[in-house]
Structure formats: structure tokens, C-alpha cells
Amino acid sequence: QVQLVESGGGLVQAGGSLRLSCAASGRTFSSYAMGWFRQGPGKEREFVAAIRWSGGSTYYADSVKGRFTISRDNAKNTVYLQMDSLKREDTAVYYCAAASTVGRYDSWGQGTQVTVSS
């Protein structure tokens, strides 16, 4: 099992930036990739971005391409989500997750709130 702790959420004005962090501990060697998901008010949880631990390939939802950047620090077992040009529709609870294999996210963090004001 992998334990995940997110941080870095908060309140920001539209057009601003935030950087989320996700610190992983436990059986981190068993994870294949890390992902960020979000759940906005009254919405279902949706995929935001993902990165493989090995090789660093990245994947993004169309809604955040060109604005968000996912990165990792293998030595620190930490994944980041740099969010630029934030929009009100980016308001959500953001969750970090670890995938044991392709598409299978089986460890989740507690979430961090991101609120974008106009």
C-alpha cells in the first residue's frame, strides 16, 4: 500500500497559479504511475494528469493541456502539479493517486481544495 499526502491547495484569483505537491510513502516501488484527479462542486471525479515514475511520460486532460504541468522528484517520492492560468472552472478538490498498473489507481490521498475566484 502507498500512502499519499497532498498539499498546496488554496484560494487564488483567476489567471493565477498554484503548485500542488503529493508526497508518497510506503510501498512506492510498487507503483507504476502517479495521477492527479479532481472533483468539482456537483461534478463527478475526473482525470487531470498523470506521470510514469520510470521514463517520466506525461498525460493530460484536454481541459488542462498547456496550463498544467505534472512533474516528479523520484528521490523525494513526490509528484507536483503546477497549475497556471487558473480558471473558475478549475475549482475542485484535487486528489493524488498511485497506480499499480496501467489505469489502475488503487491508492488515494485525502484531497486538497483549490478555489479560483473571479
Image (spheres, grey):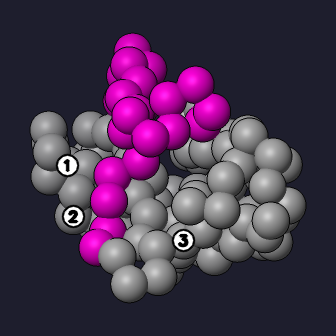
- Number of marks: 3
**Which region of the structure is painted magenta?**
44-68
- x, y percent for residue 84: 73, 39
Q: Which residue corresponds to mark 3?
A: 92
Query: Which label sits on residue 106?
Result: 2
Left or right: residue 35 compared with residue 111: left
Query: Residue 82's image quarter?
Result: top right
User: In front of the other: label 3 or label 1?
Assistant: 3
Label 1 crowd (10 A; few <14 / some 14-19 / many >=20): some
Label 2 crowd (10 A; few <14 / some 14-19 / many >=20): few
- x, y percent for residue 86: 71, 49
At numbered mark 2, what does the secondary structure look like: helix, strand or loop?
strand
Left or right: residue 62 compared with residue 11: left
Residue nearest the observer in this picture, 78 or 71: 71
Does the residue at mark 1 contact the one at mark 2 (Cβ under 8 Å)? yes
Q: Residue at x 47, y 82 (%)?
A: 41
Q: Residue furthest bottom?
A: 42
Q: Is residue 113 above or below residue 116?
A: below
Q: Amino acid at mark 1?
A: Ser
- The answer to whether residue 94 shows anywhere in this view is yes
Q: Which residue corresponds to mark 1?
A: 100
